[in-house]
Image (spheres, rainbow, N blue to C red):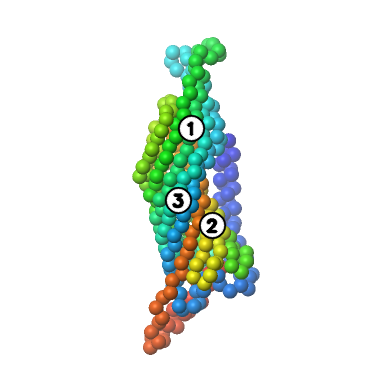
Amino acid sequence: MLAIGNHLISGLFVLIVFLFIISPVFSQNKNWKPLFPVEDIGFSLSGWYIGAGATYTLSLPSTTEKIYEFDDNSKITANFVATGNAGFLLEGGRYTLLYSNFIPYIDYGLSVKMLSGNQDYTGYQGLIDNPDTTSTSTSSASFNNYYISAHFNANNAIRISEYGYIQNTLGVNFDYKAIESIQGSFPVFSDSKTESEKFLFQLHYKLGYGLRLDKKHFLIFTLETPVLTAFPEDDGKSTIALFNSRYRPIMFSVRLLFLRNTKRPDCTNKSSDMKMDKKRKKARLF
């Protein structure tokens, strides 16, 4: 199952790169006006955004079985069942439009998120020389982790309508675990994790749909998951290890972007006005 998961992540990464490469071709073949009114000198090329959403921890495989042998000729056949719980996400930050069809804009900001999950354990203990079960033990544990996260994203888009677009995003996030709450009990074996990592530095991917509401507001729906963990070193696994299981964070968010007015240029400064107007015409977003 782990090998299948790695192949799926590799295939997803190839798809991401492919979409980033071909999206300018789709954009250039459309005759729609720029989705962001960047040639209007009344608008700034940067602004603020706020967002909220839900999180979920997906575990694949959800059920694992391990055998632990001990020096006293005994062994435990352990079955772990990991399940996810829903959490929340709040975010805010800034975006900046770029002079590029390949990466129309970047964004950066802070978020607070909660990740939650469960693990149920059933263990069968017996002698190695005798397969008959001598005893059975069970336990159940859950966790609620609260993170403060800083993120940076490079966004690419494919126009699909006059006011809508598909957004592909590659970004990085640096997470600090502010609170970890563990309830219940779980078995402690040689490979058990009694607490999750305090810091995480990850590469993530977001797939989204953006919609222009009016001239000054945009709504973006995104689905996000990490694809690589750079720190701590864990063979690059993008899942969180806790108890005897691993959990994949999935984040769904709704983000609202605000275009903001800028001061009208000084009519006496013609060269500055022309220079800024030229830049805005280059920044034809999608």
**In this view, which residue lies farthest toward the bottom?**
268
Amino acid type assigned to the residue bearing label 2 in the image: Phe
SS for dot 1: strand
Residue pointed to by mark 2: 221
Circle 2 packing at 10 Å, graded few (<14), some (14-19), many (20+), is some
Which one is nearer the viewer's eye here, 218 or 201?
A: 218
Q: Quadrant of residue 265?
A: bottom left
- Residues at discs 2 and 1 in contact (Cβ within 8 Å): no
Vertically, is 226 above or below 255?
A: above
Which one is nearer the viewer's eye here, 144 or 230?
A: 144
Residue 276, horizontal then vertical, whole percent: 44, 78
Residue 181, horizontal then vertical, whole percent: 38, 38
Residue at x 39%, y 55% (from the top left corner): 110
**In this view, which residue lies farthest toward the left?**
178
Residue pointed to by mark 1: 119
Circle 1 packing at 10 Å, graded few (<14), some (14-19), many (20+), is many
Q: In the rendering, which numbered label is found on residue 109? A: none
Vertically, is 146 above or below 46?
A: above
Q: Quadrant of residue 157?
A: bottom right
Q: On the rendered structure, is 154 left or right of 174?
A: right
Mark pair 3, 2: CA separation: 13 Å
Amino acid type assigned to the residue bearing label 3 in the image: Leu
Residue at x 48%, y 20% (from the top left corner): 137
Looking at marks 3 and 1 on the same chain, the residue that comes earlier in the sequence is marked by: 3
Res. 85 visible in picture = yes
Residue pointed to by mark 3: 89
Residue 165, horizontal then vertical, whole percent: 58, 63
The quarter in which the N terminus is drawn is top right
SS for dot 3: strand
Residue at x 54%, y 11% (from the top left corner): 130
Looking at marks 2 and 1 on the same chain, the residue that comes earlier in the sequence is marked by: 1
